[in-house]
Image (spheres, helix red, strand yellow):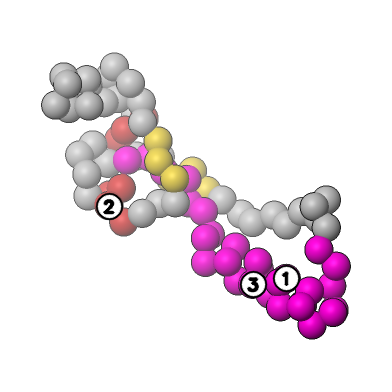
Amino acid sequence: MKAKGIAIPDDVMVIGFNNDPISRIVSPQLTTISYPGREAGILAASSLIDYLDGDREISASKKLFLETNLMVRESTMR
């Protein structure tokens, strides 16, 4: 966007996902959603192992909720 002359956040606000460490290095610093990817992977693997062991049924209606946080940085501040 910088190369095209688009000013962040004045012309467009930008938000990323997963709170990657590079979000704090780029300029302007990138607002991101902090998502617990490791925990999601652990829950998914645990559910699959339980299913394969016959301890649990897999259902499309089962929902698991993980806490996320909005990490507000320069890319969305005017």
Q: Name which residue lies at 22% across and 49% down.
A: 25
According to the picture, the residue beneath numbered tag 1 turns out to be 47
Q: Is residue 49 above or below residue 7?
A: below
Q: Are marks 2 and 3 in contact (CB under 8 Å)?
A: no
**Residue placed most toward the observer, 67 or 63:** 63
Residue type highlighted by circle 1: Ser
**Residue placed most toward the observer, 11 or 57:** 57
Label of residue 21 in the image = none
Q: Image check: 40 left or right of 76?
A: right
According to the picture, the residue beneath numbered tag 3 turns out to be 45
Secondary structure under badge 1? helix
Q: Assess whether residue 57 is covered by the magenta stretch.
A: yes
Q: Give the percent coordinates (x, y) of residue 75.
A: 31, 33
Secondary structure under badge 2? helix
* Viewer-nearest of discs 1 and 2: 1
Q: Is residue 67 above or below residue 27?
A: below
Which residue sits furthest front? 52
**Residue placed most toward the observer, 74 or 16:** 16
Q: Assess whether residue 71 is covered by the magenta stretch.
A: no
Q: Name which residue lies at 64% across and 72% down.
A: 45
Q: Image check: 38 left or right of 63?
A: left
- Residue 55 image-quadrant placement: bottom right
According to the picture, the residue beneath numbered tag 2 turns out to be 22
Which comes sooner in the sequence, label 1 or label 2?
Answer: 2
